[in-house]
Amino acid sequence: MAIAALFVVIIATVSFRFYKEGIAWQQQSLFYRQQQSQIWRDVFPDLAVPSDITMRLASEKKRLEGLAGQGIGLPSYKSSLDTLRSLISDIPDYIDLRIKDIKIDQDKVVITGQAKNFTMVEHLTTALEQLREFNMQPAQSKRVNEHIVGFTLTGQIINYNQTTDSKLGSFKQL
């Protein structure tokens, strides 16, 4: 009988302690909610205080990320300007040429120009292939006169955000 009474006293003591801790946690939670509400009113004086500020801020963050195009799983694309910069800056200095036109479409780049000879056109094609941003097709070239070769180079733009099997990509247009 004494053991049963001792057991009841222990259970009652533990239960009372948990009850008091629960009340303390509720008071602390209420205090933090009041602080959040006060901060919300200070920052957004014209808006009503939402019932769950933390959830409201999380949903607002997701909304803003969506507007900025972040965090929503959309692939990032290489801009036309980056493609053009890679194209021009990585042409070796020893290649003597005159570029007349560069067209950048959704999935390809077309370069029209002139060079001193057919070898320079081949060097340019090889240099562009080594960038690993373009799958270059064989150059279309013809002799314009005794000292000038006209050429047209076409290359498929590689999009690194797709699988390596796919060599075609797309990117934002200007």
Image (cartoon, rainbow, N blue to C red):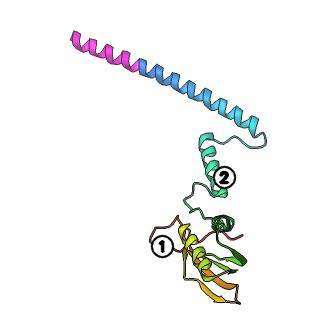
Up/down of 80 relative to 20, above or below: below
Residue 41 horizontal side relative to residue 124, left or right = right
Can residue 169 be seen by looking at this rendering?
no
Q: Secondary structure at mark 2?
A: helix
* Residue that label 2 marks: 64
- x, y (%) of residue 126? 55, 73
Name the residue located 61 percent from the left edge and 29 percent from the top edge.
Answer: 32
- x, y (%) of residue 122? 57, 78
Up/down of 171 relative to 43, above or below: below
- x, y (%) of residue 19? 45, 22
Rate crowding at label 2 as few (under 14), some (14 to 19) or many (20 or more) other CA atoms within 10 Å.
few
Name the residue located 58 percent from the left edge and 77 percent from the top edge.
Answer: 155
Rate crowding at label 1 as few (under 14), some (14 to 19) or many (20 or more) other CA atoms within 10 Å.
few
* Residue that label 1 marks: 166
**Disc number lying in front (1 or 2):** 1
Q: Amino acid at mark 2?
A: Leu
Q: Secondary structure at mark 1?
A: loop
